[in-house]
Image (cartoon, rainbow, N blue to C red):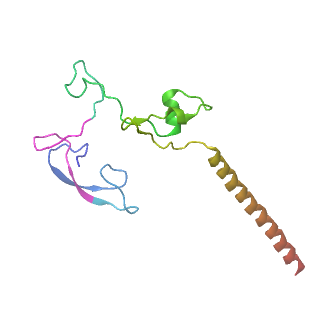
Amino acid sequence: PMKQGILCNHRVRLLFKKGMSCFRERRKGCRKRKSVRGCVVGPDLATLSLVISKKGEADIPGLTDDQRPRRLGPKRASNIRKLFNLEKKDDVRNFVVRRELNEKKKKAPKIQRLVTPAMLQRKRYFRSQTRQRMVLGKKLKEEYTKRLSEY
């Protein structure tokens, strides 16, 4: 990979440590010598990955002259709410962006982080289980201390 800050147009071998770009630490404290290319662009490069940050006064043909809509809408419940300016009480399931496959069939994503009655019931059940375990633990501890005091 190319690395910023290396002002040459060929490969160099650098010693990488945690926090440096182009390197992911496998074990704590381990350093590794890796080969990276300098950030100077040259004729030897086959492709460059670029991002348009600001639109200029003239259009680039085939890139900025046509408006293409996003293929997919949001999947997460909060992002759907944000897109359509919905309140908490509005039903998110009616606002999912659907994609038409053919005349008969449409496709919609499964909404994530959707608060449903089943989810709330599950949450209540888990909390009650935790409470029951705590009560049982207290009861067993009391029995144990009572038994200890006998001896």
Residue stretch in magenta: 33-50
Q: Residue at coordinates 21% horizontally, 19% vertically from top-left?
A: 58
Q: Position of residue 75 (x, y in %)?
A: 46, 40
**In the image: residue 130, left or right of residue 107:** right
Q: Quadrant of residue 117?
A: top right
Examine the image and state in which quarter residue 69 appears: top left
Given residues 49 and 151, the one toward you in this image is 49
Relative placement, left or right, of 1 versus 143 is left
Quarter containing the C terminus? bottom right
* Whether residue 1 is situated above or below residue 130 in the rendered picture: above
Dominant secondary structure of the residues highlighted in magenta in the image = loop
Q: Residue furthest bottom?
A: 151
Name the residue nearer the viewer: 10 or 137: 137
Q: Is residue 143 left or right of residue 53?
A: right
| Count of number-bearing discs | 0
- 110 up-or-down from 71: above or below: below
- 146 in the magenta segment: no
- Front residue of this view, candidates 19 and 97: 97
Residue depicted at 36% across the width and 35% down the height: 71
Q: Position of residue 121 (x, y in %)?
A: 67, 49
Nearer to the camera, 99 or 18: 99
Q: Position of residue 134 (x, y in %)?
A: 75, 61
State the residue at coordinates (22%, 21%).
59
Residue at position x 67%, y 56% from top? 126
**Most distant residue in the top direction:** 57
